Amino acid sequence: MSEDTRFETLAVHAGRRVDSHTGAVAPGIALSSVYSPDAGSDYNYSRVDNPNRRRLEACLAQLEGGTACACFASGVAAASAVLHALAPGDRVLVTEDVYYGNRLLLTRELARWGLEVVFVDTTDITAVKAACTPRTRLIWAETPSNPMLRISDIAALAQLAHSRDMRLAVDNTFATPVLQRPLASDADLVVHSATKYFGGHSDVLGGAVIARDDDKFFHRVRSHQITCGAVPSPFDCWLLHRSIATLPLRVRAQCANAHAVAEHLARHPAVAEVRYPGLPQHPQHALAMRQMRAGGAVVSFRPHGGRGAAEAAVAAARLFTRATSLGSVESLIERRATAEGPDSATPPDLIRLSIGVEHAEDLIADLDYALGEGTRFWRDSMSRPADPNARPRMAGPGSE
Ligand SMILES: *Cc1c(COP(=O)(O)O)cnc(C)c1O
């Protein structure tokens, strides 16, 4: 495909071609774990490489505008490979409200391995600069961040990194290359949880690292993939590759829905605060619009009434499914702190929505119900003096 092939076309065609033996238009799934040298192919053993993974890696490298890609069994396995490409004693600066699983990976595993891990506000370049030491080798930025949806300036971080012998890795899971291409802003590496928008149907786990240059650092990532072996199965690769054909369609529809939901919540009398990069009241809206093509499909908000109100609203939703994760065709709702455990820094009343491809009006109606009629009993019970006979009902009909 030529240099200027457009994104939608790449999503359908990158890494795919009609099978020259059979004419099959859809790729097959090569389940074989071993390959015979007698056939003259350069495959040998499936952990090292296989046709489905090679196709997926070629596709993702093109979508992010990189030169190389390594796929993993999950997003945290991809992050782990990048971090292990550093050396013990190296210092890494990490976005403060980084995805909670990556926080655990850093504090529980890599700190013990000898990495010096420092959490900084990567939205503040001065703070990042102040945290740099001669041993700092990597800035790990997640933008938008999870779940606060803070925006870090990728180009500014890349410039700082390259002025001091550091690399910049960007977790692009929330934005996807449909909305944001960090390598074009000079980041060195892009990391994904493919479980989210790439998979898009809540039925496959995966991760990927895409590199701007196929350099020594990326060779260590590749070596970690092969020798540590946290690889996706051929079927996982096939599922991901199949889903990616519709990635631009899904993400665009999800963003339009999310924007409508965020605007509605911002006007809602039961809502105290909405966080969505696509709204002008987001503190980094201007940067978000420079760096991203839309605000994304995750909306965080805090209802009036604190943690109890948030719990009641989440329980009352009927169309939104109460579950963690994001990026899929169905909309999900969670009180985020419950997913993050006791040392979570997320406000206890913060609700995170992952917006799917349903009709926006149905999603809005469900949120209206969850914040109104569905939690009326809860609010009444809060505003009345305790009545020993009252049994507050939190769930509306139809919810489990
Ligand atoms: C989910 C997620 C990850 C981890 O991915 P898994 O596939 O669950 O291992 C990493 N970063 C972000 C931003 C995520 O949302």
Image (cartoon, grey):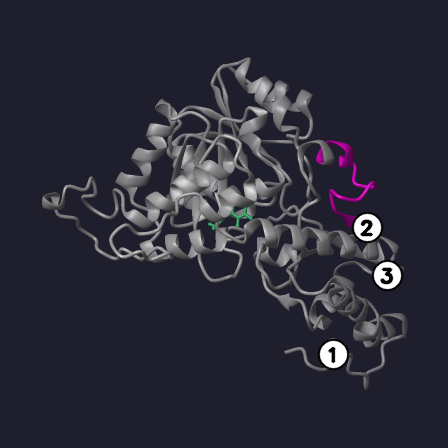
Q: Nearer the viewer, residue 15 or 262?
A: 15
Residue 350 visible (yes or no) = no
In-image side of 376 versus 230 (left or right): right
Asked whether mark 2 and ligand 1 are closer than 8 Å, the reply comes as: no
Sequence-first disc among 2 and 1: 2
**Contact (Cβ within 8 Å) of mark 2 with mark 3:** no
Q: Give the range drawn in magenta.
A: 273-288
The local crowd at label 1, few if under 14, some if 14 to 19, many if 20 or more residues have their Cα within 10 Å, is some
Sequence-first disc among 1 and 3: 3
In-image side of 209 versus 23 (left or right): right
Which image quarter is the C terminus in? Answer: bottom right
Q: Residue type at mark 2? A: Glu
User: Which residue is denoted by mark 2 in the rendering?
Assistant: 273
User: Which residue is denoted by mark 3 in the rendering?
Assistant: 270
279 in the magenta segment: yes
Residue at the spot x=26%, y=39% of the render? 227
The local crowd at label 2, few if under 14, some if 14 to 19, many if 20 or more residues have their Cα within 10 Å, is some
